Image (cartoon, grey):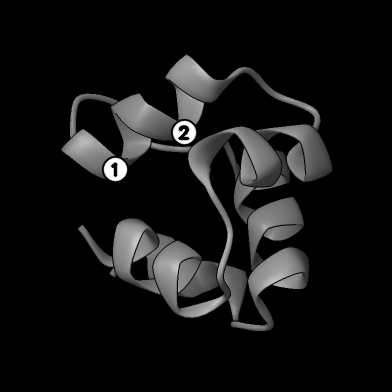
Amino acid sequence: MKLKNLREKAGLTQVELADKAGVSRSTIAMIENGTNMPSVSLAKKLGEILNIDWKEFFE
């Protein structure tokens, strides 16, 4: 998924991204694997961390 590419491009591990976003590593892994979609609030946090428009997570 897009999140994994963006995370790797930012040089972050799943744990680092999860810590910055205030969620568990497994939450990030589920979003990356396509098993789960982020909530709007989480998408906004991830967008801020990764410098992207949060709406991209829902396109």
Q: Which residue is mark 1?
A: 32
In this rendering, is residue 16 above or below 56? above
> What is the total number of numbered labels drawn onto the structure image?
2
Q: Is residue 24 left or right of residue 58?
A: right
The residue type indicated by label 1 comes to Glu
In this rendering, is residue 3 above or below 33? below
Q: Which residue is mark 2?
A: 28
Quadrant of the rendered structure where residue 48 is?
bottom right
Residue 4 in the image, given as x and y percentages of width and height: 33, 58
Quadrant of the rendered structure where residue 22 is?
top right
Q: CA distance from mark 1 to mark 2?
A: 6 Å
User: What is the crowding at mark 1: few (fewer than 14 residues within 10 Å), some, or many (at least 20)?
Assistant: some
Residue 31 in the image, given as x and y percentages of width and height: 34, 36
> Disc 1, disc 2: CB below 8 Å?
yes
Residue 19 in the image, given as x and y percentages of width and height: 77, 33
Q: Quadrant of the C terminus?
A: bottom left
In this rendering, is residue 56 above or below 46? below
Quadrant of the rendered structure where residue 11 is?
bottom right
Give the residue drawn at x 60%, y 33%.
Answer: 15
User: What is the crowding at mark 2: few (fewer than 14 residues within 10 Å), some, or many (at least 20)?
Assistant: many
In this rendering, is residue 48 above or below 23? below
Could you say whether the residue bearing mark 1 is in a helix, strand or loop?
A: helix
Q: Is residue 26 left or right of residue 10?
A: left
Give the residue drawn at x 47%, y 33%.
Answer: 28
Q: Is residue 38 left or right of residue 30?
A: right
Give the residue drawn at x 54%, y 23%.
Answer: 25
The residue type indicated by label 2 comes to Ile
Residue 1 in the image, given as x and y percentages of width and height: 20, 57
Q: Is residue 56 left or right of residue 11?
A: left
Could you say whether the residue bearing mark 2 is in a helix, strand or loop?
A: helix
**52 and 39: which is toward the camera:** 52
Give the residue drawn at x 60%, y 52%.
Answer: 43
